[in-house]
Image (spheres, helix red, strand yellow):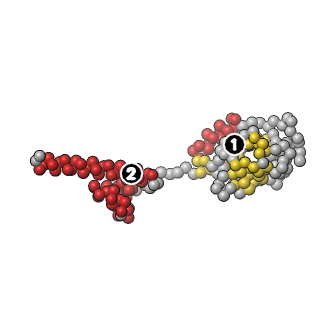
Amino acid sequence: MSGLTLLTVILVVAVLVWLAQLVWLFRFAEQHRADPFRIVSGAAIFFVAAAPVAMNSPQIVERVADFWDRLFGSRPQAVESPRVPARLLINGEQIPLDQQRMRIGRYPNNEIVLDHPTVSAYHADIVERPDGRHEIHDNGSRNGTRVNGDIVTNRALRDGDLITLGAASMHYLGSSSRETEAAMAADYRRREPQYEDDHYDRGR
């Protein structure tokens, strides 16, 4: 084997090793929720030492990535859709759950007023838990509280749950992006039951 052929083989192997390291670094960055493009662009200049430098001297890789950003301009960052807080969908209206405890009932001093004779004066509370989820608590109402048809006293809510207070029904919508909000609301609105007050006690 001539010297030129040997040099060509070594160069090809080195390039393959370099490319394999860049692919590995890209996947490694994705798994660790880092910017894979910054890591790869910062490490690529070190050729076959790309992975060792990125692992042992990440500050050097960051400096190189900053240099490329200044030279060519920063890559546009993905813009996350703003989040919509959890809310109730009642008769087509979305009511945000923007307080830690929200009372639901017939009396006008509730945070959410349901003017219906089968709903108790202070029928139930929806409470935000420390983990950000919501629970519904029945307050000893005359006609009870149901979630997806089950009578409950306390129940953690999930996105899409059907809540029924007496004969008044509503949907719980969890926190979501604005991109999906309209589609979700329209779908739940089509499926939302109307008041059905037969067989319920009135008042209280």
Q: Residues within 10 Å of mark 1 (few under 14, many from 20)?
A: some
Please, what secondary structure does the residue beneath circle 1 have? loop
Rendered image: mark on residue 26: 2
* Nearest to the observer: residue 71 or residue 6: 6
9 sits to left or right of 113: left
Give percent across and percent down for residue 117: 86, 43
Q: In which quadrant of the rendered view does residue 40 lie?
A: bottom left
Q: Is residue 87 above or below residue 49?
A: above
Pointer 1 residue = 161
State the residue lying farthest toward the left.
2
* Nearest to the observer: residue 18 or residue 87: 18
Q: Are marks 1 and 2 in contact (CB under 8 Å)?
A: no
Question: Which residue type carries mark 1?
Answer: Asp
Give percent across and percent down for residue 66: 37, 61
Give percent across and percent down for residue 154: 75, 49
Q: How many numbered tags mark residues here?
A: 2
Question: Which residue type carries mark 2?
Answer: Phe
The reply to whether residue 116 is in sight is no
Residue at image point 24% right, 48% down: 13
The reply to whether residue 181 is in sight is yes
Residue at image point 61% right, 39% down: 183
154 sits to left or right of 34: right
Give percent across and percent down for residue 172: 69, 45
* Nearest to the observer: residue 153 or residue 179: 153
Please, what secondary structure does the residue beneath circle 2 have? helix
**Counting residues from the N terminus, which is met first, the one under dot 1 or under dot 2?**
2
Q: Residues within 10 Å of mark 2 (few under 14, many from 20)?
A: some
202 sits to left or right of 170: right
Residue at image point 36% right, 59% down: 54
Question: Label 1 vs label 2: CA separation?
Answer: 40 Å
